[in-house]
Amino acid sequence: MKRRDVVVTGIGCIGPWGIGMQELSNALQRAEPLSSPIDRRSHYHRRAGAELLAACGPLELSPWLDAQQARRMSLLSQYAVATARMALQDAGLRTVRSDRTAIALATAFGPGAFTEQLTRQILEKGGKAASPFLFTDCVANAPAGQVAIDLGARGPNVTICQREAGPLLALAHGANEVAAGRADVCLAGAVDEMSELSHAILDRFRALARGRGEVPRPFDRRRRGFLAGEGATILVLEPETDARARGAHLLCRVGPTVRAFDPSAGRASFGTGHELLAATLRERIAGTLCEVDTIVSSASGAVHGDALEARVLRAACPTRTNVLVPKAVHGEYGGGTLATALLALRGAPFGYPPACSEPDEALGIAPTSGFVHARRVLCSALAAGGVAAWSVLEAP
Amino acid sequence: MTMRVTTGQLKAMIVQKLNLKAVSAESLGDEDPLFGGGLGLDSVDALELVLAIESEYGIQIQDAEVGKEAFASARVLCEFINARLQGAPAPLPARTPREQSA
Amino acid sequence: MNPPAVVVTGLGAVSSLGVGVDRHWQQALGGHAGIHPLGLFSTATHRTAIAAEVPDDAVLVPGRNLSRAERFACTAAAEAVRGIPNEVLRSPRAGVFFGSSTGALYEAEQFLRALLQHREGHLAPLAAQQNDGPGTAVARMLAVQGPVVCFSTACTSANVALSAALDALRSGEIDVAVAGGADELCETTYAGFNSLRAVDSRPTRPFRQSRAGLSLGEGAGVLLLETLAHAQKRGATMLCELAAAGLSCDAHHVSAPDPDGAAAAIGNALQAAGLSPDAVTFVNAHGTGTTHNDDAESKAMHAVFGARSSSIPVTSSKSLVGHLLGAAGGIEAVFTVLSIVHRLVPPTAGDEPADPALGLDVVIGEGRALPAQNVGLSTNLAFGGNNAVVLFRSLRP
């Protein structure tokens, strides 16, 4: 079967900004970090560590998820089911053909709170105290499974765990299912929750911006780590022919994703292989790269991660591109960069993050501010541990 | 004095432990079928309930009993628990694991 | 134009049977199960006490700061790549596709236990906690530069990884892939499966009338995969072809399987391979030994194979090595490839005959001889209704 062109016809997104693209856009225009103090009730955190996270907080998901249905779901599954419904609504799809609907989600930590509760039950009260409820919904693929049950989606169903690169890898995987003809609709994206324990562990790895009120500073010389966040972004992918035939509104066309690995990375850190990564990126999509006008960057304030990102982008991309750094606002995890890319393609105002007011001269990248209406976006994702991915999204 | 459980207490536990949002303890009838009825409960709920009962009342429920009979309704379950609390001898007729509902 | 054929050119295995593919095959032929009292942690507060644990004296790739699953993964991967020059892997044309569901959960439990006691535990292994640990450790060890993707779909993780590797090879993105899965035993999954009353207190007896649950295991199974052209060009020894994969989702229940979903996955694999069900010569089943699984799986096989389902040899490797969860597809792929190479289906461990009610031809006692040309399925069904089937076939003459 000839490979089909794939488009995005709908998006659902929730996060520290609240619900939906308009709220995200407002937050990106204000350009302030959406942070709030961490929950210290379980006493997992060390003193003088990171104190903030970009939390979703209580979200009113009842229009997309009823309480009875959600009664056994982890928070992460609830995010996934609600966001998937939002995306389908946005795409104007009331129902989907069950055996032709696939799901490809990424999660960095899976249902962290459920896993932690379950493990604590066992450690504190013994193996027999383990709750079946918690167990069945604590696996990383529980959210994707719950979305499938909710929608009756019986096509291929995958969950990717690849830290910061998960969202783009899931997008690529989902787009491939549609392009290859194995699905006519794919819900692809990322879902993340930032539990107290996950946050405390990230902090111990010195990954988070720490210090009183410290904020994420992508590409800034004062950067000290990233802001951990959470949320969900799910896209509806369809073959372009099907989408046009049903009169759907096309949000963008899905271009290629380049996948690479930097073996110089440590287990939980970034390497120095920017030449290698840039070479792979250039080799795979040289022609397309020339036409990229906007980069939605992986930069998060991570000391070495931002350096690697800057070097790769400068080596591979044209000089006059917009560079957006949404992680300065919504933090890391939750797929917010995908939503940001779609905002840029739609046309939106982006504020200059005050926290990035002193760009690191050694890196030579400053964020773009102003109204951006992109025609061709390059989303980048560098994960701690060495995985790298870049996805191209184009105006329809 | 041996503890006795009332159907009211048991129903409150069922609603709370199984996180039933659409149903209140008051609206749940003593004779309403717990499984295979409108509550939409399944085998995982049965196991969660067993865990809660064992933990709350300190009784042991054998694997074979985690089936339809003891859990037919709040009243039947209540009688089962109270019989156990008073040291009732034999468990209900054993059902092989295969006969449990999905 | 047909997509390029993909062949298997290397295998690696770590489990309760020990380290190394040869050892695994010898033990499998003898029907020797590696399911014993657990030593990794105390089972005093758990419902059962046995599991298929990697032996203490197993010679693994060293790594004080690696999780056990990472070490299993690297050990099996090192075996799988023995026949290929290092520099072929140090390339953007080489990738890693891996599955794991307990990346460093055992080490995380130790860490949490310490935290609850107001102590600081051993932090380093927790870098693997996000399930991408084992696969990414393999990628670093081999210094690949191409796509590295880690999947976590519970019991289908490794089969999903194999299917993703197949796609990447067929698309021309890469020429060689290291694919499989690794998982480690831990109290969370041990107690979790027990909470569902899914664990047998005796070693698992898949497809038997007395079946009463699964035995949990740990380890890794890894395959080296290449395009046929690449393998031929470097004169590699080819074992068999990875011909297709089929994925589906039940969309039915979070933990109980649905035979329709499993049948669909098998059907998808056959369709992708351009084969009819009649072509299948044996099945390496999911065969966990729980009533839910074995019933659903046999129904699925009847739905796909019809009357033939009572005469296609079926084996469950889980009777030997237990259920490796995210690594199950990896180690079972190893056994499936070995079955094709040696033209023999190893027995499902134990003497008890198969449950006649299931109507399957379960290989018991002696290994079952296979014809010269074979098509073997390896099926996995997981939580969330996730199903993944991979299809291997003999090299065409």
Image (cartoon, rainbow, N blue to C red):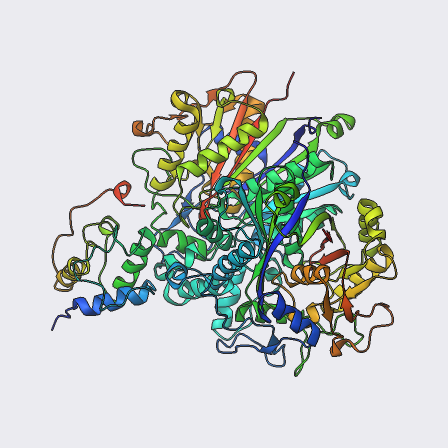
In the rendered image, residue A100, in percent from the top left (x then y), is placed at 53, 40
Asked if C159 appears above or below B62 in the picture, the reply is above
Q: In this rendering, does residue C254 appear at all? A: yes
Q: Nearer the viewer, residue C313 or A286?
A: A286
Q: Residue furthest bottom?
A: A212
Q: Residue at x 69, y 29 (%)?
A: C3
Q: Nearer the viewer, residue C333 or A73?
A: A73
In the rendered image, residue B87, in percent from the top left (x then y), is placed at 13, 61
Q: Residue at x 52, y 16 (%)?
A: C371
In the rendered image, residue C215, in percent from the top left (x then y), is placed at 41, 44
Q: Residue at x 54, y 31 (%)?
A: C269
Q: Nearer the viewer, residue A359 or A113?
A: A359
Q: How many marks?
A: 0
In the rendered image, residue A109, in percent from the top left (x then y), is placed at 56, 60
- Taking the image as shown, residue A289 lies to the left or right of residue C342, namely right
Asked if B92 appears above or below B52 in the picture, the reply is above
Q: In this rendering, does residue C60 appear at all? A: no
- Taking the image as shown, residue A38 lies to the left or right of residue B60, namely right
Quarter of the rendering occupied by the N terminus of chain A = top right
Asked if C276 appears above or below A85 in the picture, the reply is above
Asked if A347 appears above or below A251 in the picture, the reply is below
Q: Nearer the viewer, residue A2 or C246?
A: A2
